[in-house]
Image (spheres, rainbow, N blue to C red):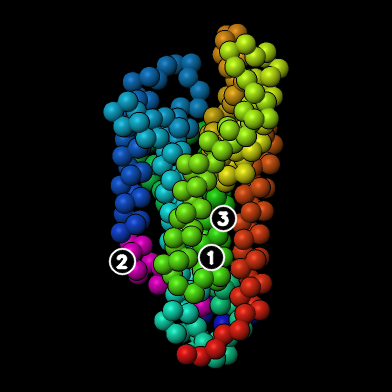
Amino acid sequence: MTGLAAIFRKELADHFNSKRFIILFLLVYLAAIATTYVAAQNIRSGITESAQFIFLRLFIVSGEALPFSLPLFLSLFIPVVGIALGFDAVSGERASGTLSRLLAQPVYRDSVINGKFLAGLTTLSVLVASIVALVAGMGLRMIGVPPNAEEILRIFGLVVLSIVYGAFWMSLAVLFSVFFSRTATSALASIAIWIFLLLFMSMIARLIAGAVVPIDQDSTAEQVVRFEEVYRMISRISPNTLYAEAFAALMTPELGTLSVMLLQESIISGMVPTPLPLSQSLSLIWPQITSLIALAALCFAISYVKFMREEIRST
């Protein structure tokens, strides 16, 4: 593709030199340091000789003083970063009047949108990898317990999962950037979708599940299980739920199922969960991972087709 490398280098330089992204990255790093410090303090006070996968607890433990864990932190900040990287990918060029001049150069049209997306994805990957490395480095120094080989592989899987999650939000922002001519409209539309899925999707899923399978205090166990299945099926429309489930199963080897009811039954019965090997954990969350990849690919494919077919005139 003629011009793809040039577009990629230019966009990558813009991302790393932008004050907006420098400030955003600093805020993300400060929040990661705070959550890691609290998690490490709690882990040090609760380590026992029989404890397993101690290093992975850095990524899932929250504190009492600061009830803000790394999964919650990543699920909140990664969409913000993804939207910030994509909301003005095309609408910003269109609003400034540089899009027609850019396409007047010996550059293929698909190189423009592909280069912008790849540059944003690279920036997101660097951010996610550096955050995970920062958490791992601080945790190693504070708790003094090095990770084993499986923990390292699970941490690497977390990096890949988080990049895929962020790629969806970036592709969604690029989609709105192609469809809307103003950057403010594109940003607001992306943020509105994020807030809706984050705050209201769970309530809507619970209402629909309650209408399909009404339950009360006299409901049987079968009805409660059916309610939980319907609720989970509807809530998985949200990428936030898919990411949270995949995160939990990947970083908690003892989690042998994603069903809340089965987990509660095992806790009540006093059964000690056996940690799953990495291969079985990946099999458990494979539907969530493929769903996130499919959603990201769908959003980018729609924006790609729309951008390739639209008429762009000089202003």
Label 2: few (<14), some (14–19) or many (≥20) C-alpha neighbours in 10 Å:
few
Which image quarter: residue 49?
Answer: top left
- Bounds of the magenta span? 7-22
- Badge 3 marks a residue whose secondary structure is helix
Instruction: Name the residue: 66% across, 72% down.
Output: 305
Residue 30 badge: none
Q: Position of residue 168 (x, y in %)?
A: 56, 55
Closest to the observer, 21 or 187: 187
Q: Position of residue 164 (x, y in %)?
A: 57, 52
Amino acid type, mark 3? Phe
Instruction: Report the Cα–Cα distance between label 3 and label 1.
Output: 13 Å
Amino acid type, mark 1? Phe
Amino acid type, mark 2? Lys
Badge 2 is on which residue? 19
Instruction: Report the Cα–Cα distance between label 1 and label 2.
Output: 23 Å
Quick one: quadrant of the N terminus?
Answer: bottom right
Would residue 130 be found to the left or right of residue 22 on screen?
A: right
Badge 3 is on which residue? 168
Badge 1 is on which residue? 176
